[in-house]
Amino acid sequence: MHRLIHEHRDVRADRTSIGVPLPVLRPIDGTGLNWWMSMFGNAVGYQQVIGAAVTEVGKRWNLG
C-alpha cells in the first residue's frame, strides 16, 4: 500500500509523504475485504490516489 501510494505520479511530483496506517482486521464486507485502513496522514488532496491503492490491494490480499 505504502509503495503504491508513494509511487503515484502526483504524490511523487509534490514530494508528499503520506502516513499509511496498518490494516485493521474486520468481518468480511460486501466487497470481500476482511480489513480496512483509516486515518491516513497528510492525505488532503490525495483521497482518490489512496482509494485507488486500497482497491488495488484489496483485489489481491486479505488478512489471514
Image (cartoon, helix red, strand yellow):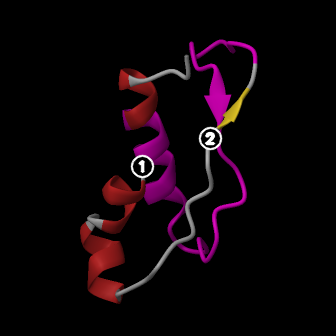
Q: Amino acid at mark 2?
A: Pro
Name the image quarter holding residue 40. Answer: bottom right
Which residue does the image show at 28% across and 64% down from the upper left? 8
Q: Is residue 39 above or below residue 57?
A: below
Closer to the camera, 58 or 47?
A: 58
Closer to the camera, 24 or 16?
A: 24
Q: Looking at the image, do the residues carrying marks 2 and 1 touch, with CB atoms under 8 Å apart?
A: yes
* Main secondary structure found in the magenta portion: loop
Q: Residues within 10 Å of mark 1 (few under 14, many from 20)?
A: some
- Residue at which label 1 appears: 1
**Does the segment drawn in magenta span residue 39?**
yes
Which residue does the image show at 58% across and 20% down from the upper left? 33
Q: Residues within 10 Å of mark 2 (few under 14, many from 20)?
A: some
Q: Amino acid at mark 1?
A: Met
- Residue at which label 2 appears: 23
Q: What separation in Å lies between label 2 and label 1 (alpha carbons)?
A: 10 Å
Q: Does 64 sit left or right of 37 as displayed?
A: left
Q: Is residue 45 above or below residue 31?
A: below
Name the image quarter holding residue 52. Answer: top left
Q: What span is colored magenta in the figure?
A: 27-56
**Does the segment drawn in magenta span residue 50?**
yes
Q: Position of residue 2 (x, y in %)?
A: 41, 57
Q: Position of residue 28 (x, y in %)?
A: 68, 12
Instruction: Give the structural element (helix, strand or loop) at label 2.
Output: loop
